[in-house]
Amino acid sequence: MTRHHRSTPRITRLLGSLLLVAAAGAFSVGAAPAPKAAPTPLDRVVPAPATAEPGGSPYRITAGTHIRAGSGEARRVGEYLADILRPSTGYRLPVTDSGSGGIQLRLAKGPFGEEGYRLDSGRSGVTITAREPAGLFHGVQTLRQLLPAAVEKDSEQPGPWLVAGGTIRDTPRFGWRGAMLDVSRHFFTVDEVKRYIDQLALYKINKLHLHLSDDQGWRIAIDSWPNLATYGGSTEVGGGPGGHYTKDEYKEIVRYASSRFLEVVPEIDMPGHTNAALASYAELNCDGVAPPLYTGIRVGFSSLCVGKEVTYDFVDDVVREIAELTPGRYFHIGGDEAHSTPHADYVKFMDRVQPVVAKYGKTVIGWHQLTGATPAKGALAQYWGVDASSAAEKARVAEAARNGTGLILSPADRVYLDMKYDRNTPLGLSWAGYVEVQRSYDWDPGAYLPGAPASAIRGVEAPLWTETIENSGHIEVMAFPRLPGVAELGWSPAATHDWEAYKVRLAAQGPRWDALGIGYHRSPQVPWPAG
Ligand code: NGO
């Protein structure tokens, strides 16, 4: 994009902000402007809304404000919003099903799609309209960001609680806006996962991919193969105690994610990355001997035994039991780095396993190495290559995309949240290089992989591998501020893409993270507000 191209909208935005300041009554003759009372401009939101037209008076939330949200799921979104607003405003904010004015969440027919919404703000109220509850929920995230950062605090704050006047119309560019958490290399409790879910929701992420098994730990109870969790889940990288989710705990994660409109995508990585399973059951090994548990960080040394029938009994049971607990459409079978599985065996294994996923009603996803086998009809491949990946590898993935395999883009040297920002980053890995904030934001998913048709791109996903990540604090300092940029690549129209403008919007999120207790990397590339 040229400079010239960018300058016009910026001037328009500036004028818009001045008008808003004036409309808020912040200017009075002879007095200095009181910038604190100026509401956040309508387009200072991450991800950038598709369109934002400022105009008219702002809305002010007061002690008399009601949240009007109908019934059912819309009502639950209203309660969710009230839970965010009540502690900091100190207002009652009753959630009711009728009346007008105040904050309204309305379901209505219109050009919103499954996740879009319109937000209208003026003197008498803010109305969010959507076709689906998911759209209302995403509109609520926008409303949150239009309010001062202090709204996120859990104790009463002075306000005022102004929302700029005007209209936002917003629908996502891609249906897949994912985040992956590796709960295998280090185990994360249900509460830690919920905390991350809440953070993902703020940026309109709609998929939570859980990497539930790997060499270092098996993290979900399987009734027909109980040792997987009790023994295979009993440690983690570095030799800590590990852990696993009971079925009820996993269901609780799924329920909580769905209350935030995220779909859980379970991953059982196979045929490689399986040492925890191989250690739990000797019969899964070709030589019938169980290896010891593994707590290091090497990859590529383990493989299920492709020639043994018991392997497919195992896969069938695992896929069936997890599919039963998972309302979402997808089942991720991994398939990466099967360096200890001969290629012909890999192909054979994938030919047998993909129909099992279909049998239990799920759509296959695999890391992009799956394109080296025969991806099932409708399968998705998750691309995790880098700029330096071979042309042949990229061409193979592009060819699969031309033949109908949908792509989720997770280029490791752009969106792997476990890559260090720079050489001073204490956590993380650097095999794909350092990934500072601009690098993770400044690329176009639609044009990324040469030869892959734009229509094959389902969206983007930011994986967080946890070889070095042990707790919520670690998750946050790696995810923030890069995750919101990936979310924006997934949500916002390509026409809004502009690093110079983005970094200013991103900087404005810093005080919000402070209010939420999110410790983030204060990247020198971002003009954070002082203080
Ligand atoms: C690779 C590897 C993972 C590592 C990760 C670390 C994929 C798909 N397989 O990504 O096992 O944890 O890198 O960045």
Image (tube, grey):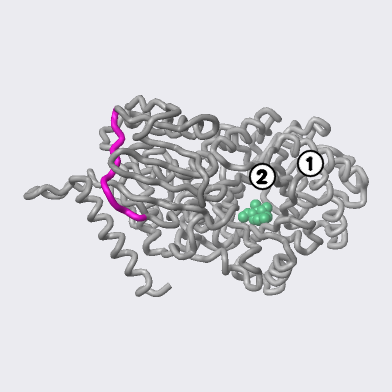
Does residue 275 appear to the left or right of 107 in the view shown?
A: right
Whole-percent x and y of residue 345?
87, 58
Q: What element carries label 1?
A: helix
Q: Is residue 406 above or below residue 1?
A: above
Residue placed most toward the observer, 179 or 86: 86
Does residue 433 appear to the left or right of 8 in the view shown?
A: right
What residue lies at 27% left-to-right and 49% top-to-bottom? 56
**Does the segment drawn in magenta span residue 56?**
yes
Whole-percent x and y of residue 498?
42, 65
Disc 1 marks which amino acid?
A: Val
Range of magenta residues: 53-63
Residue placed most toward the observer, 69 or 76: 69
Whole-percent x and y of residue 44?
36, 53
What residue lies at 62% left-to-right and 69% top-to-bottom? 449
> Which quadrant of the figure has residue 284?
top right
What residue lies at 34% left-to-right and 31% top-to-bottom? 88
**Does the segment drawn in magenta span residue 463?**
no
Check mark 1 vs ligand 1: CB closer than 8 Å? yes or no: no
Q: In this view, does 11 lie above or below 392?
A: above
What residue lies at 83% left-to-right and 44% top-to-bottom? 359
Q: Can residue 237 be seen in this view?
A: no
Q: Earlier in the sequence, mark 1 or mark 2?
A: 2
Distance of label 1 from label 2 (alpha carbons): 12 Å
Q: Residue 265 carries which label?
A: 2
Q: Is residue 3 visible?
A: yes
Q: Is residue 284 above or below residue 337?
A: above
- Give the residue number, with chain letter if any, for mark 1: 319
